[in-house]
């Protein structure tokens, strides 16, 4: 029997599951504490849980659905993990240190079908969605890494910006968010969690209606349809006007600030005229939007894109500010390791393929 990751169950679902299998509902909080506060590595460590309950948990659930394959550590404290899943697939998780705390960037899919031309994640097509448990376990693994370092540090922020399109794995995403926010578990507040989407308009509406009370970021990266379609093929199906309609729906219903992500590609989308066009596009939502400018990390030496010059980044930023648009330039992390999203995974898979045919 294939075991399900225990991390994929919300506390409510786990409580009901225990009751259905003949155990007291009160056991749920007890097990939950071992999973998320004491961070047990196996069920047998749960010493004050009824042995019969331990037995049924071990029969039906897995507490380890991934193993660390590779770990890269940057001089700035960033750690990039490459995990191997039970089925052999590889995923990336990144832990970053900030002045405000420690954030973890999680992956939601094995590969990605969105196909943004500048992104390492899109080099390898989607194989499958991650389960909610596999997404949660990335946070647990990062926290266990901190525990082992003995620094009494805690993961305080989450960004759902790793490999894959989160809204293409919608139900598992929502379960993940409920688990990590639970006050009896990891207790990471919704204000400290950001989900990024490439712009699945219908799912933005569903996300708004579900109201998980976390932050939303939109990967826009171009101010017009012609340019966005050239670098993001999703724009063929969901043009900017449709995307903006969904954004307006989100803002009107939630009144939460939104982040517009804009990666700067040299001589492609980084000119002042692009900045002015972007300012016009987001001008109507300027009170509830911040544009986050992202310096580009080349995927490899053969990348068709290059990093924008510092002067171009400054000019773009200044042009937005002069138009009254709130904006910032993303602080870079892990520049001395495989920093681009999906880069380490892609490199490892290429190495393994090369070894298998040699």
Image (spheres, rainbow, N blue to C red):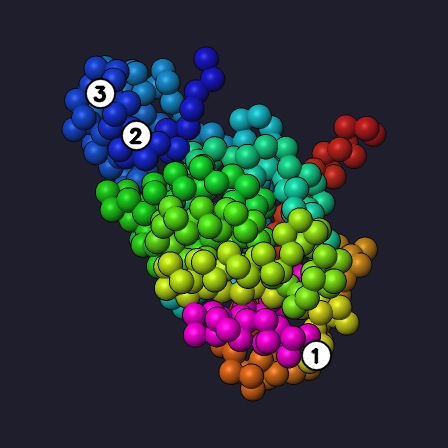
Vertical position of residue 282 compared to residue 214: above or below: below
34 sits left or right of 136 in the view: left
Q: Position of residue 97 (x, y in %)?
A: 45, 61
Residue closest to the eye, 43 or 130: 130
Residue stretch rendered in magenta on the structure: 274-299
341 sits left or right of 266 in the view: left
Vertical position of residue 265 compared to residue 280: above or below: above
Disc 1 vs disc 3: Cβ atoms closer than 8 Å? no
Question: Mark 3 sits on what residue?
Answer: 19
Of all residues shown, which one is farthest toward the top?
1
In whole angstroms, how far apart are the C-alphas of marks 1 and 2? Answer: 52 Å
Q: Position of residue 180 (x, y in %)?
A: 35, 45
* Residue at image point 29% right, 16% down: 55
Q: Which mark is residue 273?
A: 1
Question: Mark 2 sits on what residue?
Answer: 13
* Residue at image point 24% right, 42% down: 184
Vertical position of residue 68 compared to residue 308: above or below: above
Is tag 1's residue or tag 3's residue first in the polypeptide sequence? 3
13 sits left or right of 278 in the view: left
Is residue 297 located in the magenta-colored stretch of the structure? yes
125 sits left or right of 215 in the view: right
In whole angstroms, how far apart are the C-alphas of marks 2 and 3? Answer: 10 Å
Is tag 1's residue or tag 2's residue first in the polypeptide sequence? 2
Q: Secondary structure at mark 2?
A: helix
Q: Position of residue 146 (x, y in %)?
A: 39, 49
Disc 1 vs disc 2: Cβ atoms closer than 8 Å? no
* Residue at image point 36% right, 50% down: 211
- Circle 3 crowding by C-alpha within 10 Å: few under 14, some 14–19, many from 20: some
Q: Secondary structure at mark 1?
A: helix
- Circle 1 crowding by C-alpha within 10 Å: few under 14, some 14–19, many from 20: few
Is residue 343 in view from this perspective?
no
In whole angstroms, how far apart are the C-alphas of marks 1 and 3? Answer: 62 Å
């Amino acid at each position: 029997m294939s075991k399900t990751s225990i991390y994929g169950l919300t506390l409510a679902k786990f409580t009901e599951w225990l009751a259905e299998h003949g155990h007291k509902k009160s056991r749920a909080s007890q097990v939950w504490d071992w999973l998320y506060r004491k961070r047990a590595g196996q069920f047998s460590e749960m010493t004050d849980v009824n042995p019969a309950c331990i037995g049924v948990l071990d029969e039906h659930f897995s507490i380890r659905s991934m193993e660390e394959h590779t770990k890269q550590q940057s001089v700035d404290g960033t750690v990039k993990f490459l995990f191997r899943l039970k089925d052999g697939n590889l995923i990336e998780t990144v832990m970053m240190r900030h002045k405000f705390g420690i954030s973890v960037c999680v992956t939601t899919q094995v590969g990605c079908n969105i196909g943004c031309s500048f992104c390492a994640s899109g080099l390898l097509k989607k194989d499958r969605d991650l389960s909610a448990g596999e997404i949660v376990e990335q946070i647990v693994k990062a926290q266990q890494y901190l525990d082992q370092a003995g620094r009494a540090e805690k993961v305080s922020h989450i960004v759902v910006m790793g490999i894959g399109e989160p809204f293409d794995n919608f139900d598992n995403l929502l379960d993940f968010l409920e688990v990590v926010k639970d006050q009896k578990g990891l207790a990471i507040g919704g204000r400290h969690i950001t989900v990024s989407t490439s712009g699945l308009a219908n799912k933005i509406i569903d996300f708004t209606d579900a109201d998980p009370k976390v932050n939303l970021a939109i990967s826009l990266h171009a101010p017009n349809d012609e340019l966005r379609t050239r670098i993001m093929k999703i724009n063929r199906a969901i043009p900017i006007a449709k995307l903006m309609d969904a954004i307006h729906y989100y803002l009107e219903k939630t009144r939460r600030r939104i982040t517009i992500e804009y990666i700067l590609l040299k001589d492609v989308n980084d000119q002042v005229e692009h900045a002015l066009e972007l300012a016009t596009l987001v001008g109507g939502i300027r009170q509830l939007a911040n544009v986050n400018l992202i310096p580009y990390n080349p995927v490899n030496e053969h990348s068709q894109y290059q990093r924008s010059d510092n002067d171009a980044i400054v000019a773009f930023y200044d042009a937005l500010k002069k138009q009254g648009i709130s904006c910032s330039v993303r602080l870079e992390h892990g520049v001395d390791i495989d920093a681009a999203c999906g880069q380490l995974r892609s490199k490892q898979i290429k190495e393994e393929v090369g070894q298998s045919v040699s």
